[in-house]
Amino acid sequence: MARWYDRARLPYAVDRKTAEEYATWLRQVPWKLFCTLTFAWKVSDPQADKTFAEFINRLESTLECDVGYVRGDEKRLSGCGKPACGRHFHVLMTSAAPMVPSTVEYLWQGMAGNRSDKAGAHIEPYDASQNGASYVLKFINQVDGNWTFGRLDLFHPELRSVLTLNKRLRRHLRRHEARELHFSQFNPMGSELQLSLDRAISLCNPIATHCERSEPER
C-alpha cells in the first residue's frame, strides 16, 4: 500500500479504480439517506470524530435501533488557485427503522450548528442511481481525505455471510432482525414517528459540549 506522501505519484486511474471498487461493494447495502454534514466552528480531527460518534449514539437512541453508515471526510487548504474548503462529512446511512431526514437534520444541527452559522445538514433520501457511494469516497486517496464506517456487519449481505459469529455478534443480529420485523409492520406516519422526533429534540445539546466554540469554519 502506498504511503500518503506517495499518492501524488500514483496514476489517477488507479486511485479512481480503487475508490470505485469500494463503492461497488458498498452499493450492496440498502442505504436510506445521503447526508452532507458541516460544522459551524473550526474543529480538530478528534473533535469532529467525537461529535460524529455522539451524533450516531443519539440517532440510535432516537430510532431505538442500530445505524449503519459509511462516512467520507473532506477538508482542503487554499492553494493552487483553489479556495479553502471547510471540514464536512458526506455520509450514507441506513437503519431497520424509518429514517426521516428532518429528524436527522435536527439532531446534527443541535450539536454542530445551524444554517444561520453557515453550517448545518443537508439530508435527502438515498437514490441508487445517483452514485452516492462513489461521491462519499471521492477523497479517500487524497492527503486531506479519509473515510470510516460503522455497523456494516448488520446491513451488508456479503459481509454478514463471511463473519465469524461470536456471542456478541449473534446477539446484535438477533436484535437487529427483531427490529426489522417490528418496523416492517410500522406506519411511518403514526405516533411512533412523533415520538422519534420528540426524543431527538430532548437529546440535542449545544455544540459547546463537544467542540470548542471558536470562529465559524471557513
Image: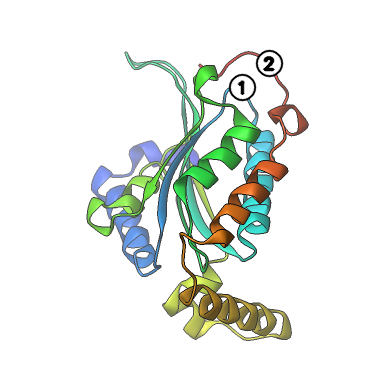
Where residue 10 sits, quadrant-wise, is top left
Q: Which is more toward the observer, 51 or 145?
A: 51
Answer left or right for 197 relative to 27: right
- Residue, disc 2: 214
Asked whether the beta carbons under mark 1 and mark 2 sit within 8 Å of each other, the answer is yes
Cα separation, mark 1 vs mark 2, equals: 7 Å
Seen at 51% across and 69% down, the residue is: 96
Tell me the kind of residue under disc 2. Answer: Ser
Mark 2 neighbour class, 10 Å CA radius: few under 14, some 14 to 19, many 20 or more: few
Where residue 163 sits, quadrant-wise, is bottom right
User: What kind of element bears circle 1?
Assistant: loop
Q: Position of residue 112 (x, y in %)?
A: 61, 31
Mark 1 neighbour class, 10 Å CA radius: few under 14, some 14 to 19, many 20 or more: some
Q: Which is more toward the observer, 93 or 16?
A: 93
- Residue, disc 1: 42
Say if residue 195 shows up in the picture. Answer: yes
